[in-house]
Amino acid sequence: MKTNSLLWALLVILTGLGLSGCKYTDNPEANLPPMPFIVKASLSANGTDVVLTWTKAKDPNGDPVTYSVVYKDTLVKNLTDTTFTIQQLSENTTVMGSIVAWDDRKASTSSSFSITTADSRYVQIPDLSFERALIKLSIDDVVDGKLLLASALKTANLNLINLNTGSIQDLRGIEAFTNLKRLICVGNYNLTSIDLSNNTALTYLVLTQNGLSSLDVSKNTSLQTLACDNNKLTLLDVSKNVDMQTLDCSFNQLQSLNLTQNKLLQTLDCGWNPLTTLHLSQNASLTALDCASSKLDNFDVSLLTSLKTYDCSYTQTTKLDLSKNVALQELRCGENPMKELNLSSNRNLTSLDCYYSNLVNLDLSSNPLLQKLRCSESRQLTTIDLGQGQSIQTIDCSQCSLLTLNMLSPVNLQSLTCFANQLSSLNLGVSSSLASLDCSSNKLIALTVAPNSTLKNLDCNLNQLTSLDLSKCTALESLNCAVNKLTELDITKSLRLETLNCGNNRITELDTRQNIYLKTLSCLTNQLTTLDLRKNTALTRLNCEVNKIQVICLASLAQVKSNWTKDDSAVYKVCN
C-alpha cells in the first residue's frame, strides 16, 4: 500500500512537469524579421563607385538591427550605418546585390539594388536643374545625367544665375571642374551643401541666397572673393584663405568670426549676424567694414587706419571713436543711442548717415568734403553746423527738433528735406543747384530760394509764410504752399507747373493762365472771387471749395471732371 502511494505521487509530479512543458512549447514568443526597407543606389562623381543608402529597417520585436552588404559575396557585416560605398568597380558594369537587415536572433529581411557604372569619360550630374543649366551654357548638350569630363575640365567660369532652369538642389559633379576659377550659384534655397574640395583653382566664389548650413573652403586656398551671404551658416572658417580680399557673409547665423589670417582683406560685410566676437587685429588693409545689426556694440576700429567705409548701424553703439580713421569717407551709424559724435578728425568724410540717434548737436564744420547727410528722426537734435557747406549735395534732417540749420555757402545743394522741425527761417539764396526742397511743418516766417532754373519740387506747407517769391523758379513742377498766411501767389513764371496746392491761405487772386501743364489744383479755403481755367485743359483734379468764387471760366464744359469739387454757389461757365 505504501509503495502504491509513492508511485501515485511520482506520477502526479511527472504529469505536472509534462503539462508545464507543453504550455511553454505551445506558446513561444513570436520572433518576426525586420520590416521591409528601401535601398537607393547612385554613382559617385567618378562614375565607378556605387553609393548605397537605405532607410532604417524597424524590428517588430524592438531588437537592434544590423546590416550586411552583398555583392557577389558578403562585403561587410554588422553595419549600423545606413550607407556604404562599393569602390573601384569597372566601367560599364552592372552591379546587382542586396542589403540584408538582421536582428539579434538571426531573423533577416533583404532588399536588392541594381545599377550600371559609368564610362570614365563622363562625370555624373544627378540634378536635373544643374544639367539643364550646363546645357544652356553650352557646356553640356543633352539631358542624360552625365557630362563629358573634358567639358568640365575646360570650364574656367561657371555662372548659374538667371538661367530659368529651376532651382538646383544638388551640385554633385562640380568636383570634376578642377580648373574652375569663377563660380556663381545664387538663389537655390534647397541647396544645403556643396563640396568644393576638388575646385582648388577657385579665386571667385559667389553662393548668395542658398540654403547652405555649412561651407568648407579650406581647400580653396587661392580664393580672393567669397560671397556666402543670405544662407544659414553658423560657422565659417576662412583661416586657410590667406589671399582673400573680399568677404561677404552677411545675413547668416554667425556668432563669431576670426579673420586674423586674412591680412590682405580689404572689404568685409558681416552685417545682420548675431556676432558677439569679431577678430580684426591683423586686418590693417581693410577699407570697407559692414557689421550692421550685430551685437558688436562700441566696436573698436582704431587699428583699421585704412578704413574708408564703415557701417555700424543697429548695434546699440553709444560711443564711437573714429579719431584714428582719418581716411574715412562714408559712415553709417544710424539706429544707435549715441548722444555724441565727434568727426573732427575725419576731414575726408563725404557721406554720413546717423538717423534715429540721440544726438543733440551735430558739428560737421570740420568736414568740408561732406556731400550727403542723413540725420532724420533724431528727435533731440536741435543744431546742425555744416560750416561753409560748399560740398553738400543732399540733406535729410527731417523729424528732428532743429532750431537752426547753419551752412554759409551750400552752392552745390541739390536736395534738402527738413520737414517737421522748429525752423523759423531758411536762406538758400546761394543754392543755385537746388532741385527739391521739403521744409514743411516748421515755423518758417521767411524762406529764400535762389534765383535758379533747377528747382522742380517745393513743399513749404504748414508754416507761417506771408510771402513767397517764385519769380525765378521757372523749372518748378510741383508746389505745396498750403496752410500758411499767404495773401498773394504769383506762379506766372513757373510754366512747367503740374501740381499746385495752395489751400488754407488768404489768397485773393490766382492767375493760372500761363500754367498750361497744370494737372492738379487745390486752392480751397482762400479768398478767391474768380478762377479762370480756360488755358488749363490738362487739369484732371480740382478742389476750390470754401472760397467766394461765383464763376469758374472754362474753354469748354468738357473740361469738367467728375472728381472736381467746388462751392455750390460757384458755376462753370464757358468764357470768351
Image (spheres, helix red, strand yellow):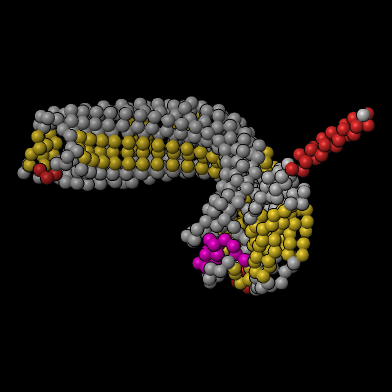
Residue ranking furthest to the front? 1
Is 496 rendered above or below residue 142? Answer: above
Quarter in which the N terminus is drawn: top right
Is 338 rendered above or below residue 43? Answer: above
| Residue 206 magenta | no
- Nearer to us in this view, 424 or 480: 480
Residue ranking furthest to the right? 3
Q: Where is residue 191 in the image (x, y as percent from the top left)?
A: 58, 53
Q: Is residue 327 visible?
A: no
Total marks in image = 0
Q: Where is residue 41 in the image (x, y as percent from the top left)?
A: 65, 61
**Residue 481 found in image quarter:** top left
Quarter in which the C terminus is drawn: top left
| Residue 135 magenta | yes
Q: Where is residue 151 in the image (x, y as percent from the top left)?
A: 60, 71
**Residue 223 found in image quarter:** bottom right
Specify start and end residues of the magenta stretch as a single range. 124-137
- Nearer to us in this view, 247 or 357: 247
Give me the residue at 36% from left, 36% from top.
438
**Residue 501 found in image quarter:** top left
What kind of secondary structure does the magenta stretch mostly adopt?
helix
Give me the residue at 40% from left, 34% from top.
418
